[in-house]
Image: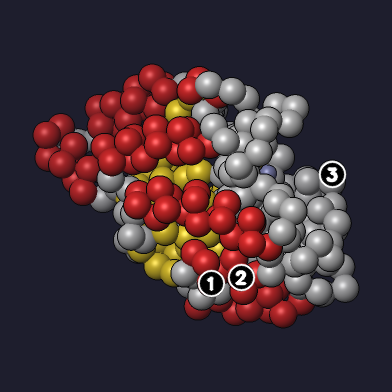
Amino acid sequence: MNSNHQRLGRRSVLQNGTLIMATAAVAPSTLIAEEIDSTLKIGLLTDLHFADKPPAGTRHYRETLNKLEEAALQFEQDKPAFVVELGDLIDAADSVETELRYLSTIDRPFSAIARDRHYVLGNHCVDTLRKEEFLGSVGQEKSYYSFDRGGVHFVVLDSCFRSDGQPYGRKNSVWTDANVPAAELEWLEADLKSACNRVIVFAHQRLDVTSHHGVKNGAEVRRVLEASNKVLAVFQGHSHQNDVKDIGGIHYCTLVAMVEGSGADNNGYSTLSLKANGTISVQGFRQQATYGWES
Ligand SMILES: [Zn+2]
């Protein structure tokens, strides 16, 4: 474990914040104001798997609507600059028409949360639907792209490609065959070269494991991220459980799935805060773990 990595409870993060303020040689009130002003907040959700169908195993597809409503109330308070949905917004339907209906049903409350929102493609998003159908329905132009907010560069990756480079869609793929193709890797390398010094990456399939949940060429992607020397953290979903790995100076944080389990307590979502001093914190709600990393 990296020495500057700490897994902290909700209270510890607050204590940590107090500690930073207490050691600074500035009047506390001034510092508090500066700290608040320089914090960029982002709402994070993943693996909603919404579908109008009965539960299967631990996945309670219909309950996602209520869980999302709770997350929306939290984000109303936290006022994130933007929200990111890290993939698998919907679950399988037996026809394109039904799948598009699931998508519009869940996207209506999701899009009400924030005008500025980003969709990472998950394998379930583009299992029945083609990428252009999913993106067209939610009003997003590209499946992988980047943008800047508050002095930070954000990258959205798309690993929904088969080994032969074919994009997922119309049941043409196996979920264990996730790849970032050469063209996207080249784009990523060039994008990171021209990016500012602080980069955060959003992905669905995991870049930090070699199991079935990992991107097949994850090591290659990590090499590009590490070589840039600019990437602070990667936020990802797909394996439905809380996890963190530190590899090559980058935090890989896997967020808990919203669809898992029944009832309000089995919800999971978070507010990510990025401070100008490099501190990153994930305030987790319900089943989502809370983390804090100092620069
Ligand atoms: Zn999922």
Residue 267 horizontal/vertical position (percent): 52, 28
- Residue at x 68%, y 63% (from the top left corner): 96
The residue that disc 1 covers is: 136
Looking at the image, residue 228 sits to the left or right of residue 19; the answer is right
Q: CA distance from mark 2 to mark 1?
A: 5 Å
- Residue at x 48%, y 38% (from the top left corner): 65
Which image quarter holds the N terminus?
top right
Q: CA distance from mark 2 to mark 3?
A: 29 Å
Q: Residues within 10 Å of mark 2 (few under 14, many from 20)?
A: some
Residue 170 occupies quadrant: bottom right
- Amino acid at the residue labelled 2: Glu
Looking at the image, residue 175 sits to the left or right of residue 159; the answer is right
- Residue at x 34%, y 22% (from the top left corner): 15
The residue that disc 3 covers is: 211
Considering depth in this image, is 286 or 227 the residue closer to the camera? 286
Which image quarter holds the C terminus?
top left
